[in-house]
Amino acid sequence: MPKKYKDNNKEFHLDVDMLKEQYLDFFYMTDEEFQENIYDALHFACYVCFLKNIPTKDILSDEGLIHSLVHLLKKNTRKFVEIKQIRKKFNEMLIIT
């Protein structure tokens, strides 16, 4: 059942079951499928990092999750990151229980 929360006086709906399903979708993707769905993965990561209140350093620093996902967006910056390491971090940090 969706829950409601407020951010800047705006009401949003949070459906934990849907988040669990999305997490599992990403978890079971191949690296190629994950790369093809990188925009969705990035959006999911932003949302879950916010909900879990993950420290900024862990998501935006040079080796942070969001920063690393952004590198996957463009071919010329993918060489700076390893998708296997990013996926491991993604799976560990964003698990929905």
Image: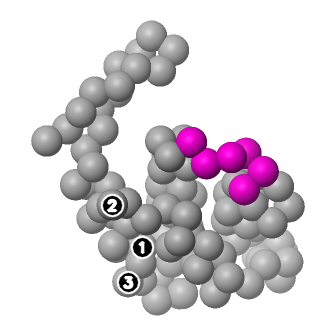
Mark 1 and mark 2 lie on one chain; the one further toward the N terminus is 1
**Numbered range of the magenta stretch:** 53-58
* Residue at the spot of label 2: 97
First in sequence, mark 2 or 3: give its number.
3
Image coordinates of residue 83 in percent, x first then y, are 66, 82
SS under mark 2? loop
Label 3 is placed on what type of residue? Answer: Tyr
Between 74 and 3, the one lying in front of the other is 3
Q: Amino acid at mark 2?
A: Thr
Q: Is residue 10 magenta?
A: no
Nearer to me, 4 or 53? 53
Identify the element where label 1 is drawn. Answer: helix
Q: Residue 80 occupies which quadrant of the picture?
A: bottom right
Residues marked 3 and 1 touching at CB (< 8 Å): yes
Residue at 22% in and 54% down:
17
**3D distance between C-alphas at marks 3 and 1:** 6 Å
Mark 1 Cα-neighbour bin, 10 Å: few <14, some 14–19, many ≥20: many
Q: Is residue 54 magenta?
A: yes
Point out the image quarter for the C terminus. Answer: bottom left
Q: Is residue 27 left or right of residue 13?
A: right
Tell me the quarter of the picture where residue 45 sits. bottom right
Q: Nearer the viewer, mark 2 or mark 3?
A: 2
Which label is found at residue 26?
A: 1
In the depicted structure, whether residue 64 falls above or below residue 74: above
Q: Residue at x 41, y 78 (%)?
A: 27
Residue 23 point in image, percent of width and height: 38, 66
Name the one closer to the observer, 36 or 96. Answer: 96
Label 3: which secondary element: helix
The residue identified by callout 3 is 28
Q: Residue furthest left?
A: 1
Residue 35 quadrant: bottom right
